[in-house]
Amino acid sequence: MEMPKPDITVLDRKSEIVQKLLKVLPKDAVIFEERETHAYECDGLTAYRCAPMIAVLPSTTEEVSAVLKICHAEGVPVVPRGSGTSLAGGALPTEDCVILGIARMNGVLETNYDDRYIRVQSGRTNLSVTGAVEENDFFYAPDPSSQLACAIAGNVAMNSGGAHCLKYGVTTNNLLGVKMVMMDGEIVDIGGAYLDNAGLDLLGVICGSEGQLGVVTEATLRILRKPEGARPILMGFNSNEVAGACVSDIIKAGVLPVAIEFMDKPCVEAVEDFAQAGYPTAEAVLIVEVEGSDEEIDEQLSKIVAIAKKHDPVELRESKSAEESAAIWAGRKAAFGAMGRINDYMCLDGTIPVSELPLVLRRIGEMSEQYGLKVANVFHAGDGNMHPLILFDANKPGDLELCEEFGADILKLCVEVGGCLTGEHGVGVEKRDLMSTQYTDADLDAQMRVKDVFDPKWLLNAAKVFPLASSDARRSA
Amino acid sequence: MTQTAEQKLADQVAQAHSNGQKLRIIGGGTRQSLGNTCDIAATVSTSDLNGISLYEPGALTIVAGTGTPVEDIEKALAAEGQRLPFEPMDHRGLLGSKGTPTIGGVVACNISGPARIQAGSCRDSLIGVRMIDGTGTIIKNGGRVMKNVTGYDLVKLASGSFGTLGVLTEVAFKVLPASEATATIKIQGLTDEVAVATLSEALTAPYDVSGAAHITAQDTKDATTLIRLQGFKKSVAYRADKLKEQLNKTGDISVVTAAKQNAMLWKTVRDVEAFHKTQTAVWRISVAPSDGPNVAQALRNMTDTQVVYDWGGGLVWASVPYGTDVRAALTGIDGYAVCIRDQGASGQSVVPQNAAIAKIEQGLRAKFDPKGILNTGIMG
């Protein structure tokens, strides 16, 4: 992975910059010893590592502002970091950067049930947002798999999704407002506890901008009342095509499940070895979850069963209790762990039109044979967000490169059939150089023009999202 | 939409860019009076960008040219038992305008209706756009899949930009299944405070409310509070029972189940029919729901005011005498107000933003429309 050459003039001034930072931050919030900065050398994309020059851990928005003012004046690149769980290398440092971690800012600032929102500091983890309102039977809907660890700051940066977004939407649909510090240190409030905002939808473009437009320090989030209950049904089919057709028929019939999860045979086998969830031996397994009261759930499940039966399922297992629900979900939730047990893996997240599912799965199978690398597919079928897991051996020379090449081919296929490179993980460094397969130069330039406005010096997380060649003129200006 | 039609428009914009000619973008022409008065030398019409180019019911997605009538899209969706999630308002009655609303106008103004409280606004359903920026360059962003975080979300930025960042040519939406049944819990005689508290109680119950409105009246006993439930028949009946039981403390409560009556009721709310015939100015105010009654009270203290609440109280439609500036009523309350209708254009219906935000907005407009030729001044 190519990264821009570090700015020697910045590296040369390291001790000077550290001194300036120490004037605005407590001593324990500035990390600059080499043995300590290594703690920040990578995020969830562990294949790439680079220790930052300095890491800072501010505790207030004002401290964030003070740090950014210094970095702006000194021309120091800044890489914001939430919990560091990005699978796309969104928080990967450069050698000459300051990592700005917001983990110390994790408080709840305000909870309002009547108006259905919560205001939190952005270092708070996703799951602990729900944790803060759960006793009153409320929840925060977006549920990325990393929700135990990932921070709201990262969720906002990557516009994170989750298994339940078919019904509840992704981060951008549940974000009402932010407090954000611009690269020059200016603090701005955008949106708030109300639904529509005046002027251009800046909140909409900030969400998903991968930390390139500003550092979000507070977020106002929509909270929802929990449904009375939820139960899944597990279905097994003899082919991916049939399972795909069943998904499409469920949606066409007017049922809107909260989640439709799809696992192919290699995935099911790995899961069975690992978690013994009792999944059927089938080419494809679907888990469909619906919500409501017991009667409402029964009504929806009976409609789903009727549709599934037309597709000759090899297994239909309707959950009747909390225990049975947990058993059905156990395998799906263990999927990534199960794959990790077999080998190293790379997780992709291209999205495709649901109608292209059979074609794409067949092509991935063919490519898997060509590359000689195994693939298991587990994904959110309702919205076409795929998660092919390519297995490789990190200790085998050349295997990572081969895996990356294979991954790139899968993502190109996703774009070719009308989909996109990433549905919920973000571009980061991982998919940066593939952006040109989805977007023309003019399309990319339009996006970069937005960054020009928010961060004219291109200091914030600048080596991400856009192919280096496309952003070079701006970064080195 | 044909590529030639799009290219023709791009050529027109490129020409205007080189001449510095100011363009007014016209769709169906039913919402032309929204926003500030703009400088116009010529018009650019989306009427040739007409037609649905892709509709996949099984994938819940539809793509259409921006000149496509909203009605055509709604008809195509209805034929497959689906709908636009955000229930876009028809402005003709309120603005006294003629013409055929287009989907491009809906997106450019980010128009949503009562369902916004549950299903989000237009921008939340919008998953892809094609547009021509102020230099005549064709740009695409997003696509036709509903989960997409590939690059910046210019789709959101375009929605509600009133054409100032580009001429929208094609839009893609995620859609939803239409509901098999609808029930509306109707309560008569509540004061604003009690009504909004009741809406809040309904919205914080686990019954998936898809509409929460309150129409005030001169005499409180004629005020109507409406709470909508949608979905499968049995489920709607179950939730309506439960909710009615829970809310059965105040006022005269009943449940409307007939489909036609429900459609009429919610069209009344969606299109703000209460103010169609009044000789008054109409403002649209967005606040936290519990602030809604405070804004209304402040307005009543100022002048003769009628109010319709939607979105659980968070959207306040205020009818006030011509020439009233309702912004004074928002002192100390977070939110914003925009004038939708007044006698003779005051020319300034958009509220200025604070300086930092205004600077970002101006910067963005300058990047997408460097010569300021697209709907110049419409957003202030």
Image (cartoon, rainbow, N blue to C red):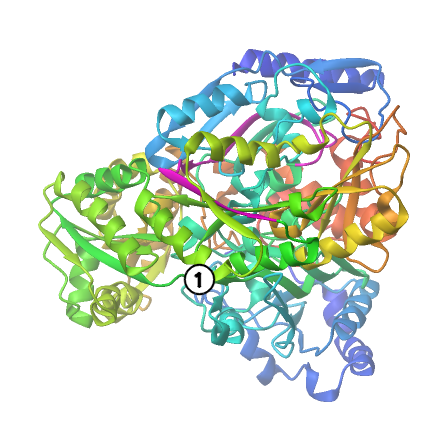
In magenta, the rendered stretch is B160-188
Pointer 1 residue: A144
- Residue ID at (18%, 59%): A268
B324 left or right of B84? Answer: right
From where the camera sits, is residue B352 visible? no
Which secondary structure class fits the magenta region best? strand
Residue positioned 69% across, 33% down in the render: B274
Q: Chain of mark 1?
A: A
Residue B243 x, y percent position in the rendering: 45, 56
In the displayed image of the protein, which residue is found farthest to the bottom? A27
Residue closer to the observer: A147 or A120? A120
What x and y, as percent, mark residue A235?
Answer: 17, 52
Up/down of A37 relative to A340, above or below: below
Disc 1 is placed on an element classified as loop
Residue A158, quarter of picture: bottom right
Image quadrant of residue A9?
bottom right
The answer to whether residue B38 is left or right of residue A209 is right
Q: Is residue A418 left or right of residue A375?
A: right
Taking the magenta stretch, the answer to whether it contains residue B171 is: yes
Three-letter amino acid code at the position of disc 1: Pro
Using the image, determine if residue B105 lies above or below residue A463: above
For disc 1, the neighbor class at 10 Å (few under 14, some 14 to 19, many from 20) is many
A111 shown above or below B75: below
- Front-most of residues B26 and A346: B26
- Where residue B347 appears, as percent x and y from the top left, is 88, 29
Q: Is residue B175 visible?
A: yes
User: Is residue B243 left or right of A238 when viewed as pictured?
Assistant: right
Camera-nearest residue between B233 and A305: B233
Q: Is residue B33 magenta?
A: no
* Horizontal and vertical percent position of residue A323: 22, 72
B256 and B180: which one is in front?
A: B256
